[in-house]
Image: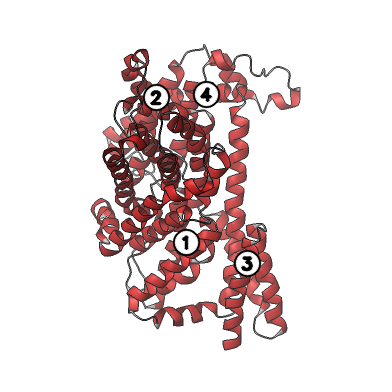
Amino acid sequence: MLAAEILSLVMFATVCGVLILGFPVAFSLAGTALVFGLIGAGLEMFDLRLLGGLASRYFGVMVNEVLVAVPLFVFMGVMLERARIAEELLETMGLLFGRMRGGLGLSVIFVGMLLAASTGIVGATVVTMGLLSLPTMLKAGYDPKLATGTICASGTLGQIIPPSIVLVLLGDILQGAYAEAQREIGNWAPEPVSVIDLFAGSFLPGMLLVGLYMSWVLVKSIIQPKSCPALVAEDEVVHDLRQRILTVLLPPALLILAVLGSILGGIATPTEAAAVGAVGALLLAGRRLDMAETKDARTLEHFPAGRKLLLAPFWLGRKLDRGTTLPVYVAGICLLSQVALASVFDMRMQRTEVPVGDLIAFLVAAAMCVGVLWGVLVSLSRVYTSMVLDDVMQSTLKISSMVFVILLGASVFSLVFRGFGGDDIVAHLLSNMPGGVFGAMLAVMLVMFVLGFFLDFIEIIFVVVPIIGPILLQMDISPVWFGVMIAINLQTSFLTPPFGFALFYLRGVAPPSVSTMEIYRGIIPFVVIQLTALVVLAAFPELATWLPKVLFK
């Protein structure tokens, strides 16, 4: 059996090498596992009948309601990005803080936080912030090192600030790992761990990181004022600042508050809240893309008759559109009102007796669906005729497909790894690590930190966490704290030279005047901040465990 366990470690090292060479992730995981499975079967170290369990695993992925939140959150973030709502946010925040030193840097961090709460995709956020804010910061006289470091660090906030795709995937994996760990120690009725717990646990550490980032920019504005000068705005633009805050900043903030608040308040599941976020992002895009911009972009009449049925929602939205933002505002008010009603009243109609107040609230919420439908149809017509919807749907499909195909490939890898007994040798190594639980946790964090240089967070979550999660969680470790530690650790590895993904994303969109070495040097203070936050969270687990206990008793 020792030879089989060693073969499992060789398989793990091989798949890491294949991934570093750049082969497709999902097929590398599944292909490497199948090859080693056949080798193991030939050496009588692996039972190929174990692969029969793949069908039930795949079916479990398909019926997992939590994972439905992934494409919805992706759609929400990509829609906000493609409709240039993020660009308007950055411009407004720049004007708001424009007269103070470091104000533009603070704006970038704040908008990065909002984008993190809406996209959860590091690459998309870093590229968007790099294209929008880096030229403005350089033109304003910012030190390139501070500008690039701020953008990279702000872009990685999508790893930790909920609602995040990373936390959705990590929460689903941890749920199974924690249940398995509890069964191993004889607890057959453990307290469930959900994605909602992880969202609540990551909120305070995420805000801590945002505060530390902003504090560093403020310190730089004091000790090196020339590195982040004030952005002097034009008087006529400042005159309209209050209106811009109400029309540009407030709607996305309300959307994020509705999505995150409904999750943490126990009003909606992450999947339901993601649906609210997707509809809200569509409405915001429809509000920005009025008829003046879209009426000549694309017509619906030239399509063949066979496709007109599919285009009926866009055609109906076109007929309902009168070139005003009224339908969008009506739909937005109705959507937020429905969330508010759900937080106060129990509108489940399957009960034997329904109180009058709940029945009235249900009828009001049902009537508001008409207002939401009106705004959705108009918004669909606008984003379709402006050709934004095509790009958004394609990007959502590509990203979501990537996530789920990797998940299926990782299922094959995990099954073969366990079939070789690899989990036993990992458990033995961690259990005998010097320092006990602290030593085991430190070793796992170091391994994940190094793997983050080469592998994407999805690969690490799907490959590493199912292996080490059940073992560590048997050592009386809080699963919520453990999950938040993993998220911050992976976020740090995105920033660390020479292989940090965020650095490569920014290098791809940065102007030639900004050197790669300046990007590397600029990120060093933010890496120190990240590591400091990780140490603080390790020393004070209550930062991650307090809010879930308060919210969910």
**Residue depicted at x 55% and y 13%:** 292
Mark seen at residue 17? 3
Q: Are marks 3 and 1 in contact (CB under 8 Å)?
A: no
Q: Which residue is mark 4?
A: 379
Residue mark closest to the camera, 2 vs 1:
2
Residue mark closest to the camera, 4 vs 2:
2
* C-alpha distance separating marks 3 and 2: 46 Å
* C-alpha distance separating marks 3 and 4: 46 Å
Report the front residue among 229 and 543: 229
Q: Are marks 1 and 4 in contact (CB under 8 Å)?
A: no
* C-alpha distance separating marks 2 and 1: 37 Å
Q: Which sits earlier in the primary sequence, circle 3 or circle 1?
A: 3
Residue mark closest to the camera, 3 vs 1:
3
Residue mark closest to the camera, 3 vs 4:
3
Mark seen at residue 220? none
Q: Position of residue 114 (x, y in %)?
A: 39, 38
Q: Which residue is mark 2?
A: 248
550 sits left or right of 65 in the view:
left
Q: Secondary structure at mark 4?
A: helix
**Residue depicted at x 33% and y 61%:** 481
* C-alpha distance separating marks 3 and 1: 24 Å
Q: Which sits earlier in the primary sequence, circle 2 or circle 1?
A: 1
**Residue depicted at x 27% and y 37%:** 344
Q: Which sits earlier in the primary sequence, circle 1 or circle 4?
A: 1
Mark seen at residue 173? 1
301 sits left or right of 70 in the view:
right
